[in-house]
């Protein structure tokens, strides 16, 4: 006897499925806008301590917004005025000098062996033989970067609107939640804002210190294009772990044109700074707010880089660092009773007590 099995799907289930598909489609289509909003939100959160300070001194809210806008746009304009001419000028000179650099590097290498073979493969690339083509690509990338600067100014404008209207919009949205959830969200939001704010301000400080240190080292050793290489160091310092290698290798290669000893000294001094940054500067700048293990940072950055590029790497660390807050406020009821306490003990053992 054949048995028949019937599946009944309600219109409600079909509606939920269609809604989920629609939301996924909108997420994909609107992802560039979502990235823009997230960057603007991170910047706005970084100004929260300044806004809170003005409120404590009984300044009107518009004055806090105006002060934030002046500082933000003034700082960005100053960086653009200083960095763009240095980057374009020295970057173009570096590309044009690639053929002579290739000959100088080749003369310093052993005449035979595995090192010579790998170097010959690298130095025989078209970039060294035809710098004009690479120069065209360089300026094409700069053109795209300048359009990115325009988009970044849009991000800054949105950030100012977040500073101005963010608290009111937050209060309007949180009113939809039950009272118990409002209290939890308020507590979690306060801690998350602290984590994100420390990350943004801390990253700006560490990148500025890294670029300044690199410029001083390269200038003292008379390494060509020190300004360009210092900007590269400040930019790649945003990327944890791999960023150190991305700005150290070009600096050592350029220092090799001065002397092999200069190249080794650049590598050693960069390495010393990397250790100082990781074990002294970062703990002092970030405090105990951004506690992430090296493995967590590596996996998070790799995943975010694959999914969303450099912007994803910038966004992912404060998001991941906010997980312990979410765990305490929202996930505790769904975990084993001692999970949060054990995670806290592991964190204190690794990073020290708060």
Image (cartoon, rainbow, N blue to C red):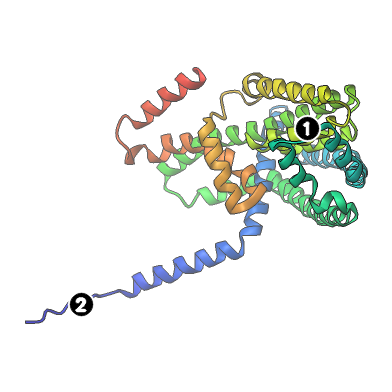
Residue at x 34% of width, y 70% of height: 13
Disc 2 target residue: 6
Q: Which corner quadrant holds the N terminus?
A: bottom left
Work out whether 134 lies above or below 179. below
Work out whether 121 lies above or below 258. below
Work out whether 139 lies above or below 47. below
* Mark identifier at residue 286: none
Lateral position of residue 351 relative to residue 99, left or right: left
Q: Nearer the viewer, residue 71 or 8?
A: 8
User: Among all residues in the image, which is located at the extreme front?
Assistant: 112
User: Which class describes the residues within 10 Å of circle 2: few (<14), some (14-19), or many (20+)?
Assistant: few
Q: Nearer the viewer, residue 28 or 243?
A: 243
Residue 143, image x and y in percent? 85, 56
Residue at x 34% of width, y 31% of height: 339
Residue at x 71% of width, y 45% of height: 164
Disc 1 target residue: 110
Lateral position of residue 153 relative to residue 4, left or right: right
Residue 308, image x and y in percent? 61, 52
Real-space Cα separation, disc 2 to disc 1, in angstroms? 77 Å
Secondary structure category for the residue under label 1: loop
């Amino acid at each position: 006897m054949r048995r028949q099995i019937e599946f009944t799907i309600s219109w409600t289930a079909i509606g939920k499925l269609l809604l989920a598909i629609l939301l996924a489609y909108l997420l994909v289509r609107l992802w560039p806008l979502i990235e823009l909003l997230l960057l603007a939100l991170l910047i706005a959160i970084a100004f929260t301590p300044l806004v809170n300070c003005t409120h404590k001194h009984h300044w009107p809210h518009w004055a806090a917004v105006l002060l934030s806008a002046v500082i933000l746009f003034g700082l960005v304009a100053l960086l653009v005025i200083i960095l763009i001419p240095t980057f374009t000028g020295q970057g173009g000179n570096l590309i044009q000098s690639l053929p002579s650099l290739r000959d100088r590097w080749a003369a310093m290498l052993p005449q035979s062996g595995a090192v010579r073979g790998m170097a010959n493969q690298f130095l025989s690339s078209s970039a060294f033989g035809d710098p004009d083509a690479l120069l065209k690509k360089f300026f094409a990338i700069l053109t795209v970067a300048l359009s990115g600067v325009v988009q970044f100014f849009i991000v800054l404008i949105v950030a100012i609107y977040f500073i101005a209207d963010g608290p009111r919009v937050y209060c309007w949205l949180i009113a939809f939640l039950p009272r118990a959830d409002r209290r939890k969200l308020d507590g979690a939001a306060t801690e998350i804002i602290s984590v994100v704010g420390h990350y943004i301000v801390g990253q700006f400080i560490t990148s500025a210190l890294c670029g300044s240190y690199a410029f001083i080292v390269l200038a003292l050793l008379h390494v060509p294009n020190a300004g360009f290489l210092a900007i590269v160091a400040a930019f790649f310092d945003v990327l944890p772990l791999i960023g150190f290698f991305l700005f150290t290798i070009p600096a050592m290669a350029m220092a090799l044109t001065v002397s092999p000893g200069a190249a080794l000294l650049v590598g050693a001094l960069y390495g010393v700074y990397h250790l100082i940054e990781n074990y002294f500067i970062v703990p002092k700048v970030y405090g105990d707010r951004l506690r992430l293990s090296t493995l967590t940072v590596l996996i998070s950055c790799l995943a975010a880089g694959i999914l969303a590029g450099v912007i994803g790497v910038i966004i992912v660390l404060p998001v991941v660092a906010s997980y312990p807050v979410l765990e305490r406020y929202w996930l505790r009821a769904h975990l084993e009773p001692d999970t949060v306490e054990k995670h806290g003990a592991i964190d204190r053992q690794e990073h020290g007590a708060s």
